[in-house]
Image (cartoon, grey):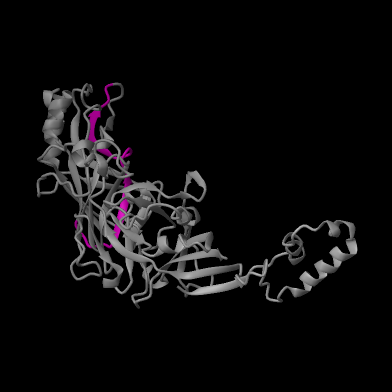
Amino acid sequence: MEKTKTKARYNCKELAVKSQPKQKSLTRTPGLVIFLICIYFSSCNKDGQISLNNNNDDLNVESADSTTVRTATYQLDPLPSNGTGIILVGRMDDAVTGNLGVSSYFRIGNAAISSVSLPDDAIFDSLSLALPYQGYYYGDTTLTQQISLHRLTQEIKLIDQSSAWEEDEIPVFASGSALFTNNTFSYDTNPLGMVAFKPKPKSTTDTVFIRMDQSFGKELWDKINNADGQVTNQEEFLNYIKGFVLVPTAKASNVIAFHTDSLLMNIYYSYTRTTDGKGVQAKLQMKIDDNAYQFNNIQIDRSQRLLSSLKANKKGELPASETDQQVVLQGLSGLVSKIQFPYLYEFVNRNDVIINKAELIIETPQSSYVPYSPPSTLNIMLADQHGVPKSLLTSSYDASTTQVAYLANDLTGGTANGKYTLNLTEYVSNYRGADEDKESALYLSVPISDLLTKTDRLLMGKGDGTSAIKLRILYTKY
């Protein structure tokens, strides 16, 4: 442990008076009091060191800049990804986290067609899927993205919370029945439609359209026109059209988000208006019926990558000692950075130490940003002895506020490291007098809302054997 010592400054005059035993004669002799004060004042060392009652112990403020921090890249169990309101599709080929493909499953409701009345001469034109941008993207949007749409051949079924987790293994981000990032449902390999486009995720007006198979559209139209039970009855409809999946088909190195609530399956038709004889084009718009049945699935290949020995769909960890002191975190894939302090309990429980302040400092090299920008904020989850994240770290001495670390950008022109800082004063102080727990840990992560809906990642460390995560403690030794 490296230390930086700063002698404490104290009021020598006040301490000198208080350290003297009471003597009645002093109260009658002001001159003698002044004389004794001056003697004590002149005896204080110039460097601020103080001696009380002839005791040679020093009161010092010290800083430990390199308290041992043990880190690892930790893989959580597959995350729940349904009901978030965000459709994610894309592919990232990252030298750090591997090849990540994101597909999205959903089902369409029959509300718009269950009791519709169509003109007698209405003719089917086409069927298409409209995908309005949600605004989020990650990766290189200058590259062409390609998506295919497939029809499910298997019903989407939710997994009850009691079936997903044991009672004592429910994580902080669990909420009722779920569908997870590793869930898949069978679908027809022949696509109903495909589209290739250059993403414009920040656009508020652009929409991605997928022209769907004409024969499928005509079949659906005929059932609507004939008021077939397969479209008028919800249960029969969901058996007829079990759902769809959007699959990325190009290595575009970007993931794009679309609004779940704004997704539309448009049935275009035309007819002749009886009032004036003019041709009219119209459409029926079908929507997602239940957001709980929309979820994002991921496929990960980490072979020949930094994390090649870490399995993607099974809880486990890869110590930083095996990756040249580099650790990684990433949303949706369930990667977090595990942090432990093996000698902190012993240090905090020393009889001669009082903790004044503790900070966790995380540095990330600028070279790791392209084309995957670092998260703007980070949180810490507190994991139990079984590795289950049970809660979020709150602000020191304010249990009502979740603690957030903001990225402090380099101000030297982009050559130095980015930095995040978290206040661990209360967390570290709580080690004092507590039972030692060598199994619990902190998980550094993107915020939970992003953990379940974004693919943002962060690489910490330069790969030179130097840890990028440090615990800095300011303490008083006496």
Position of the N terminus by quadrant: bottom left
Measured from the top left, where is residue 259 in percent x and y?
33, 43
Residue found 22% across the figure and 31% down from its top: 109
Q: Nearer the viewer, residue 199 or 54?
A: 54
Q: Residue furthest toward the bottom? A: 464
* Residue 143 in view in this figure: no
Pinpoint residue 335: horizontal percent, then vertical percent: 29, 57
Magenta span: 249-274
Judge from the rendering whether residue 162 lies leftward or rightward of residue 454; answer left or right. Answer: left
Quadrant of image for the C terminus: bottom right
User: Is 260 included in the stretch rendered in magenta?
Assistant: yes
Q: Is residue 367 visible?
A: yes
Q: Residue at x 64, y 68 (%)?
A: 8
Q: Position of residue 288 (x, y in %)?
A: 26, 35
Numbered marks: total: 0
| Nearest the eye: 20 or 77 | 20
**In the drawing, does residue 100 fall left or right of residue 436?**
left
- Measured as percent of width and height from the top left, residue 400 is found at 49, 42
Taking 351 as reference, is 276 above or below it? above
Residue positioned most to the front: 24
Task: Write down the quadrant of residue 35 in the picture.
Answer: bottom right
Q: Is residue 246 magenta?
A: no
Quadrant in which residue 143 is drawn = bottom left
